[in-house]
């Protein structure tokens, strides 16, 4: 939903202008659960959306913030793959970043630098906006590498942070979901159906369960992501941009440089 961010595709976020009552309708399914929330990487885009943290604090100053991070270079590679897939899905070509992604990771990285997207990987800089507004006990930093090492331990740690009984964790939380290698896009014929008013009228008469099954099983196909070929110069420029923030962030969270391989490699180059 990306309700709280300042901009969407470099334009003012129209959803935020609709007001908090409109936003709260997204949670109409709430049935007394201990917590509800949403997740979006867009809320850590401080350079392009400087008011996001303030908007969240204004909405709920007691909000619990879970900030998930990973090796910054690997984050960029994963982000490019996602945007490449969206670019391949023709219905999303209106997003400029998706068009950049189709031209290759080097081109995409350079364009992202121009619009200050690289700052999303300066995790300390991003988190500082929330630390200035929320008490430390309301902020939890979670490393993807900890999930990789032992998901159960990390799930329980976050549950305790959220005030939930860690012994009630579900094994579903250990499923590898939304993986880039599993990403699919609509087949061309499905795109035609989705944009044809008469066919859509007939399709809407079918049960929702049938439509969902047909879309996933018949209408989607895996997207073939090109091999990642990022030039050494672009990689070096990116790591130069994030490295000092990354050193400080890892130290503040009691993590070793070896936690993130690209950072460890950069550190070795700098020291030699």
Image (cartoon, rainbow, N blue to C red):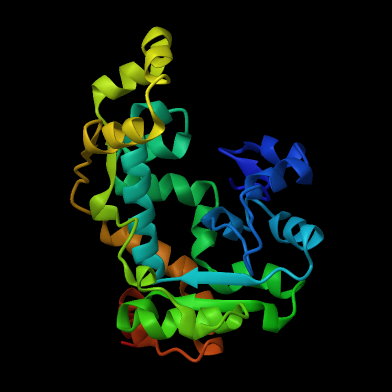
Residue 200 x/y as whole percent: 40, 16
Q: Quadrant of residue 53?
A: bottom right
- As drawn, 266 above or below 205: below
Q: Residue at x 73, y 59 (%)?
A: 56
**Would you say residue 53 is visible in this rendering?**
yes
- As drawn, 219 above or below 122: above
Residue placed most toward the observer, 203 or 101:
203
Q: Residue at x 31, y 49 (%)?
A: 81
Position of the C terminus, as image quadrant, is bottom left
Position of the N terminus, as image quadrant, is top right
Q: Residue furthest top?
A: 198
Q: Quadrant of residue 190?
A: top left
Residue 221 x/y as whole percent: 21, 37
User: In the image, is 148 to the left or to the right of 256?
Assistant: left
User: In the image, is 226 to the left or to the right of 203?
Assistant: left
- As drawn, 207 above or below 179: above
User: In the image, is 72 to the left or to the right of 52?
Assistant: left
Residue 246 x/y as whole percent: 49, 77
- As drawn, 173 above or below 267: above
User: In the image, is 175 to the left or to the right of 69?
Assistant: left
Residue placed most toward the observer, 40 or 32:
32
Q: Residue at x 25, y 20 (%)?
A: 189
Q: How many marks?
A: 0
**Would you say residue 247 is visible in this rendering?**
no
Q: Residue at x 51, y 47 (%)?
A: 114
Residue 223 x/y as whole percent: 22, 41
């Amino acid at each position: 939903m990306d309700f709280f961010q300042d901009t969407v595709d470099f334009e003012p976020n129209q959803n935020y202008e609709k007001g908090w009552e409109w936003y709260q309708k997204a949670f109409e399914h709430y049935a007394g659960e201990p917590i509800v929330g949403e997740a979006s990487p867009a809320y850590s885009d401080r350079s392009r959306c400087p008011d996001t943290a303030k908007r969240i604090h204004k909405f709920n100053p007691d909000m619990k913030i879970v900030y998930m991070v990973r090796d910054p270079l690997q984050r960029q590679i994963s982000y490019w793959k996602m945007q490449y897939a969206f670019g391949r899905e023709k219905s999303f070509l209106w997003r400029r970043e998706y068009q950049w992604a189709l031209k290759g990771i080097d081109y995409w990285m350079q364009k992202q630098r121009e619009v200050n997207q690289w700052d999303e990987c300066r995790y300390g800089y991003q988190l500082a906006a929330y630390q200035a507004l929320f008490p430390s006990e309301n902020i939890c930093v979670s490393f993807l590498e900890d999930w990789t090492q032992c998901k159960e331990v990390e799930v329980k740690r976050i549950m305790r942070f959220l005030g939930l009984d860690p012994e009630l964790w579900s094994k579903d939380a250990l499923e590898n979901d939304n993986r880039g290698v599993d990403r699919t896009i609509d087949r061309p014929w499905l795109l035609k159906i989705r944009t044809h008013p008469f066919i859509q009228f007939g399709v809407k008469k079918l049960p929702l369960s049938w439509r969902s099954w047909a879309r996933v099983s018949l209408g989607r196909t895996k997207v073939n992501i090109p091999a990642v070929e990022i030039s050494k110069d672009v990689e070096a420029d990116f790591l130069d941009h994030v490295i000092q923030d990354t050193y400080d962030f890892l130290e503040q969270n009691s993590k070793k440089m070896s936690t993130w391989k690209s950072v460890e490699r950069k550190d070795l180059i700098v020291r030699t």
